Image (cartoon, rainbow, N blue to C red):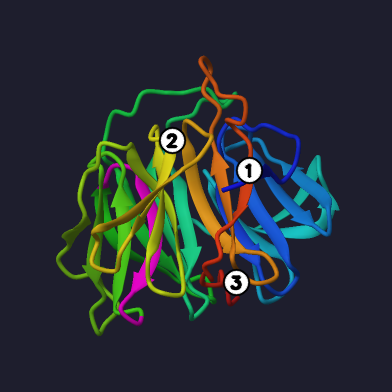
Amino acid sequence: MKWQPVCDQRFKLAEGPFWDDVQHALYWVDIAGFRALRLHQGQLRQWQFNEPVSAFIPTTQGDALVTLASGVYRLDLSSAADHPALALLCVADPIPGNRANEARCDKRGRLWLGSMQNNLDAEGGDLPLERRSGGIYRVDADARVTPLLSGQGIVNTMLWADDHSALLSADSLDGVIYRYPIQADGSLGDRRIWAAEHVRGVPDGSAMDAEGYVWNARWGGHCIIRFAPDGSVDRIVEVPLSHPTSCVFGGPDMTTLFVTSARPASGALDLDGSVLKVETGIKGLTSDRFGG
């Protein structure tokens, strides 16, 4: 595989890639750099915040959502990089000292948000993780928030399996990906381990292909693991990154895999902290915009 950076920049903690199939644009964030970025027609734009931002998702109204530590906001994409125009949509997680981490939209345009204890200081430096106070929340198009899960460590991966009858989500502190049945009333049923611990790193963000296989970025594992629909390991894809953080399918044929990564303070590889792309020959599922 021939990996290529999408731009020359290196980021502290690039995460949350989103491919907008409408405008053929790539969105992502630098959580520890407090930045949201969009690459469209070869032009890179960014918006600078004063707190961690974990996801950057366009909406059906033409603006975008950003999940900041203080809440979920609408961002005016025409606003200036150093003066982003924000409007509060909701505070999904009300627990003081928490922040958003993983966030994706389902086919109905609802935002599913996973949170964790905020582990970043005012400059984006690391803070110790001391509690399992994270949760999973669902945000409807009208900004109504439904708490779904509590007591989580680091929520990562948010995918839907079996015709959206189940949620696949990892807790990186546990080192596994869980499967939660989605009940008729929208609540989550009892979980089971869907993908077990693996020697090649810790589960971070994921993408799903059209065959129902999950491509999971492995924090500290230098690879992406492709899991079969039953949670077994299908293949290991080596990447020139020590800490891949997440991935998404995109490109004109939806066969390009975009991979975000973190850059460690010491011992970094040359491409650590970059956003890479590679042609897989396998079609992926499209990302869904927020429906509000």
281 and 56: which is toward the camera: 281
Badge 1: residue crowd in 10 Å (few <14, some 14–19, many ≥20): many
Residue located 25% across and 85% down the image: 184
Tell me which label, 3 or 1, sits earlier in the chain: 1
Residue 289: assigned label: 3
Q: Distance between the Cα atoms at labels 2 and 3? A: 30 Å
Residue 62 pos. (x, y %): 74, 71
Q: Read off the residue under disc 1.
A: 275
Provide residue 202's location: percent of width, then percent of height: 32, 39
User: Given the image, on which type of amino acid does mark 3 rest?
Assistant: Arg
What residue is shown with label 2?
222
Q: Nearer the viewer, residue 102 or 230?
A: 230
Residue at image position (23%, 67%) is 230
**Side of 260 where 78 appears, left or right:** right
Mark found first going from the N terminus, 2 or 1 = 2
| Residue 135 belongs to magenta span | no
Q: Is residue 82 visible?
A: yes
Q: Is residue 87 left or right of residue 13?
A: right
Q: Is residue 270 above or below residue 85?
A: above
Q: Quadrant of residue 190?
A: bottom left
Type of amino acid at the residue the image marks with label 2: His
Please give the name of the residue rendered at 60% of the width and 59% of the height, measured from the top-left corner.
Answer: 18
- Residue at 81% across / 40% down in the picture? 82
Q: Which residues are magenta?
A: 152-163
Left or right: where does residue 61 sit relative to residue 169?
Answer: right
